[in-house]
């Protein structure tokens, strides 16, 4: 089995997002990419990596972008230049609504978008943003089936259930504060165990008016064990994930065959 059908190298960047400063945040990622580990297959960036979270209507109107804006154009260039996929989310505008829009941009030009479904009702997010109306996507990339959710979606296991092993890897892009860090880490582990898949928790770093986010990026394997390691003196957290080993584990312990079937109908 060759590298593109077995091992997948993940690199996530727990960057300290400069609030409302798209140019500064893009420049930070650009600089970090100069030390991107070789043979990386997927770069996973935090939730709203170019702007941070905003609940001010005027600020949102100024910062929100279409899928053809600077953020996605830059991601396309990076994907082509580095020969890997990029995932994360950005502040999107599809008039008359704003969305927290997840993305997977592939080096061949393929693009997949997903609008965050579960909006945090304890903040203004649920009033300022529109919820997504489609389930998390599953993207086939280098022999892996990959799904993507955004932050608060993680708390809802039915929403991100890998039914009949429909995906092999779950990307969770987040701005999750340390005040709820215990929950974040253990929910990631739970999603890995119950879905028998690798899970990437790509959190931002630093702090802002809403809290401290440092030290909360993780990569877990299909058994829920830590798989992420810092990449030397670089800002990256990386892991080499084996699909062969994951498939062997699923075959030896086929709990998905006993899982319940269901339909998502109430809110879609």
Image: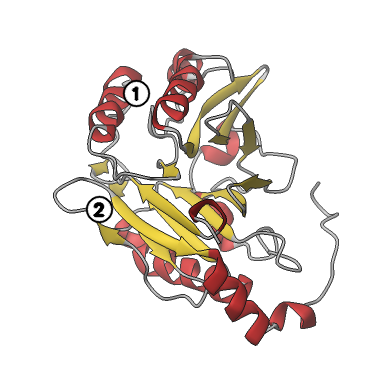
- Up/down of 227 relative to 84, above or below: below
Given residues 231 and 120, the one toward you in this image is: 231
Q: Is mark 2 on a helix, strand or loop?
A: loop
Would you say residue 217 is visible in this rendering? no
Extreme residue toward the front, this view = 1
Q: Residue at x 58, y 28 (%)?
A: 108
Q: Is label 1 in a helix, a strand or a loop?
A: loop
| 140 relative to 52 in the view: left or right | right
Q: Is residue 181 visible?
A: yes
Residue depicted at x 44% and y 34%: 48
Which residue does the image show at 39% across and 34% down from the upper left? Answer: 49
For label 1, the residue is 20
Q: Mark 2 points at which residue?
A: 214
Q: Residue at x 48, y 55 (%)?
A: 3
Q: Where is residue 223 in the image (x, y as percent from the top left)?
A: 50, 78
Task: Locate the N terminus by quadrant.
Answer: bottom right
Sort mark 1 into few (<14), some (14-19) or many (20+) by Cα contacts within 10 Å: some
Position of 264 compared to 243: left or right?
right
Judged left or right of residue 247, residue 47 is: left
Above-or-below relation of 57 to 181: above
């Amino acid at each position: 089995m060759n590298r593109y059908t077995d091992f997948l190298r993940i690199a996530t960047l727990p960057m300290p997002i400069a609030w409302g400063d798209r140019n500064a945040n893009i420049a930070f990622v650009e600089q970090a990419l100069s030390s991107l580990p070789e043979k990386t297959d997927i770069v996973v960036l935090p939730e709203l990596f170019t702007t941070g979270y905003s609940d001010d209507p005027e600020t949102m109107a100024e910062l929100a972008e279409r899928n053809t804006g600077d953020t996605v154009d830059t991601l396309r260039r990076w994907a082509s230049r580095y020969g890997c996929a990029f995932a994360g989310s950005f502040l999107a505008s599809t008039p008359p609504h704003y969305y927290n829009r997840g993305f997977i941009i592939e080096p061949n030009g393929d693009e997949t978008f997903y609008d965050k479904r579960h909006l945090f009702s304890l903040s203004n997010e649920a009033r300022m943003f529109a919820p997504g109306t489609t389930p998390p996507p599953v993207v086939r990339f280098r022999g892996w089936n990959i799904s993507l959710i955004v932050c608060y979606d993680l708390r809802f296991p039915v929403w991100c259930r890998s039914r009949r092993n429909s995906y092999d890897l779950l990307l969770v892009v987040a701005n999750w504060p340390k005040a709820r860090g215990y929950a974040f880490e253990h929910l990631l582990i739970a999603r890995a165990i119950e879905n028998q898949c690798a899970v990437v928790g790509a959190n931002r770093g630093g702090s802002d008016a809403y809290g401290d986010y440092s030290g909360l990026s993780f990569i877990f394997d299909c058994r829920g064990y830590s798989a992420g390691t810092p990449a030397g003196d670089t800002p990256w957290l990386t892991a080499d994930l084996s699909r062969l080993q994951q498939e062997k584990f699923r075959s030896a312990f086929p709990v998905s065959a006993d899982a319940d079937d269901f339909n998502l109908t109430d809110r879609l």
